[in-house]
Amino acid sequence: MADGNTLGAIDRVGDAASQDAPAISVIIPHYDDLLNLGVCLAALRSQTMAPDRFEVIVADNNSRCDRSQLEAVCRDVHLINAPIQGAAEARNAGVRAAKAPRLAFLDSDCRPDPAWLAAGLAALDHHALVGGRVDVSVANREAVTPAEAFEQVFAFNNERYIREEKFSVTANLFTTRAVFEDVGGFRTGVAEDYDWGRRAAAKGYVWHYAADAVVEHPARRDWQELTRKWKRLTSEGFALAAEAKGGRRRWIIRSWLMLLSLPLAALQAARSPRVAQPQDRWKALAVLIRLRWWRFIEAHRVAF
């Protein structure tokens, strides 16, 4: 059992072992997304933290893009190959390559705020597990698509995830190597951020929400991107639920509760401060209704 927020002797020894080692390693899984990866790395070059205090590891997961282009984008960071397919395995490979006693996880399509690393590292001085704020961005604020409006309202509510569900999305997660090794790596085939966060909480580690450690994540732009995301999440969610006794039955019950909670979710969309224009709330509401029914059907499809 871990001692709450106590980081332990392993971290202190690790910090003292080598003054030449970076203070924190940023781990980014990547698969065929050079444009966004380039923007992400540019944002990391603009961090307020001194460059010699952190390292960036890009764990490439068998990308099909031109290798020379990938190496050009990653010209000043540590590029490694993660041959086992899946973002979870890529993150684990990044941890194995990391030199620092503290770890930051970031997605390749995220844009970290200039103070992101400094804020996350400061929070790790007092907390074993830290998740930051995730803001959802859109391509054109003057022409928000229905899918983008939906994501602005409902996606990446990391504060609620941390306070109520005891996990953080891996797009903005900080911890220490000692904690990571105690909890174990990310697992493929399940909702890895939820699974890892709950395993950490079960060991007694306490989650902390760092509102000043901010990353920006682009919204899904259309129905196809949205259903691709939820198809993966539904499959991973069921795989995790099915591991428990009676998991299938509880999964089906939750699918009905999701549908029955539609009026409350509709009220959330109507009142959300996360969208600027009234018409965008109506767009979010329309997608909400359609997607809840789609998810209900998909939940039953994967269960039977």
Image (spheres, rainbow, N blue to C red):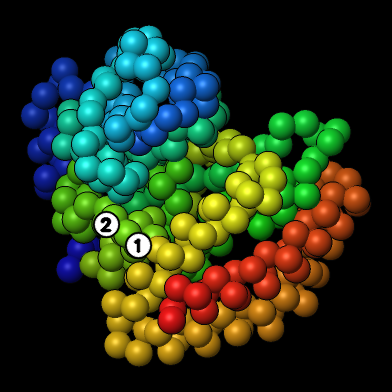
In the rendering, at what x and y percent does residue 174 appear? Answer: 36, 43
Q: Which residue is mark 1?
A: 190
Q: Nearer the viewer, residue 200 or 1?
A: 200
CB of mark 1 within 8 Å of CB of mark 2?
yes
The quarter in which the C terminus is drawn is bottom left
Residue 257 in view (yes/no)? yes
Q: Position of residue 128 (x, y in %)?
A: 30, 51
Say what secondary structure mark 2 lies in.
loop
Distance (Cα) linking label 1 and label 2: 7 Å
Task: Name the image quarter holding the N terminus.
Answer: bottom left
Mark 2 highlights which residue? 187
Count of number-bearing discs: 2
- What residue lies at 84% left-to-right and 49% top-to-bottom? 280
Kind of residue indicated by mark 2: Arg
Crowd band around label 2 with a 10 angstrom C-alpha radius: few (<14), some (14–19), many (20+): some
Circle 1 packing at 10 Å, graded few (<14), some (14-19), many (20+), is: many
Q: Specify the quadrant of the image occupied by residue 28.
A: top left
- Label 1 SS: loop
Residue in the foreground of this view, choosing between 65 and 5: 65
Residue 101 visible in the picture: no
The residue at 69%/45% (across/down) is 222
Residue ID at (52%, 79%): 300
Residue 230 spot, x, y in % from top left: 54, 59
Q: Residue at x 32, y 46 (%)?
A: 86
